[in-house]
Image (cartoon, rainbow, N blue to C red):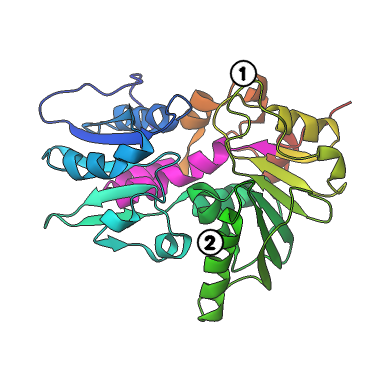
Amino acid sequence: MNLSPALVPPVSGSTDLFLIPGDPVEQVRAPEVFNRVFAALGINAVLVPVHVAPTDIESFVRAVFLARNVRGLFLAIPHKALVMDLLDDCSPLGRLAGAVNGIRRTASGRLEGGLFDGEGLRASLDHFGMAYAGRRVLILGAGGGAAAIGASLAGVAAELALYDPVPGKAAGVAARLAGARGQGQGGAAQVRAAQDNDPAGFDLVIHASPLGLRADDPLPLDVSRMAPHAALVDILMKNQPTPLVRAARARGLHAQPGFEMLIQQAPLYLDFFGYPEAAQAVRQDATFLRELIYPTVLAREIPRPGDSAQSWVAQARPVVN
């Protein structure tokens, strides 16, 4: 791939503008990834983070699309579920999860929502060789990201359990996913709200809550309760490897940060926003994006073109002495 050395595209009056509202917004990594893609591939577009409170998100979305050069929105926590009533149309996964992480405006002015978190997570599990089909899966969290992951895994996991400390939140997501299964839209053998965050008996644990964004946050689960064969993904984009990932690796478990989930989503976003050639380029080789967002301590785990699947999966499962 012939890449421009620029990390951020130049901005002019003809630049297409994408925004990513969140609250907080300091942890988002999508601007780094997509501005690098835009600059590297000569796309006249830029992605900018904006700090928007949950109480203001509906007004913000309505107002921002009045600007003719705003092509779309990426959505960070906690807005993914809060914008659903503003959409004219939505992808099937978005309807199932009750959340979206992308909004585009069509030529006719309609707002369409898409959801890519779950598909990105599922692709990252394949990338790392983490089994989920026919397995027992615990998702910690019940926000938009967790719901998206649940929607993508519900059709293949043997059991899907969601836990959130907010009363009724996990139960609501589980009921929606289970209800879709009952209506013939696929689903796991069992979708339920977990009573607690105990990972015992689960084959795969996915951490999709905000715990870990702050240095003084407690661990979201007791890693010592995980089965010896269990795997873990912490989808946080900040403070990686998090104390949770470190603790799981210290036990010799296969534990991964959430960077690959974002990498695997990138082509989906690019297709959604009308950049199919860029999407294909990233599918063919995303090394330059991994080099951008993986911290130094994890750099040796970046797969390189020509690496065998066995070699980079082994690198992604570091042995802790």
Asked whether disc 1 touches disc 2, contact meaning CB atoms under 8 Å apart, the reply is no
Structural crowding at the residue carrying mark 1, measured as other residues with C-alpha within 10 Å and reported as few (<14), some (14–19) or many (≥20)? few
Structural crowding at the residue carrying mark 2, measured as other residues with C-alpha within 10 Å and reported as few (<14), some (14–19) or many (≥20)? many
Residue 306 position (above or below residue 192): above
- Name the quarter where the C terminus is drawn: top right
Query: Residue at point 56% right, 39% down?
Result: 260
Query: Residue at point 56% right, 75% down?
Result: 181
Q: Is residue 97 left or right of residue 319?
A: left
The quadrant in which residue 17 appears is top left
- Which residue is at the front of the view, 320 or 286? 320
Indicate the position of residue 282 as horizontal and vertical percent values.
42, 41
Q: Is residue 281 shown in magenta?
A: yes
Indicate the position of residue 201 as horizontal and vertical percent values.
83, 56
- Name the quarter where the N terminus is drawn: top left
* Magenta-drawn segment: 256-282
The quadrant in which residue 259 appears is top right
- What SS does tag 2 mark? helix
The number of numbered badges drawn on the structure is: 2
Disc sitting over residue 151 in the figure: 2
Q: Nearer the viewer, mark 1 or mark 2?
A: 2
Which residue matches tag 1?
Answer: 296
Residue 320 position (above or below residue 169): above
Query: At label 2, which amino acid type do we have?
Result: Ala
Sequence-earlier tag: 1 or 2: 2
Q: Is residue 176 left or right of residue 222?
A: left
- What SS does tag 1 mark? helix
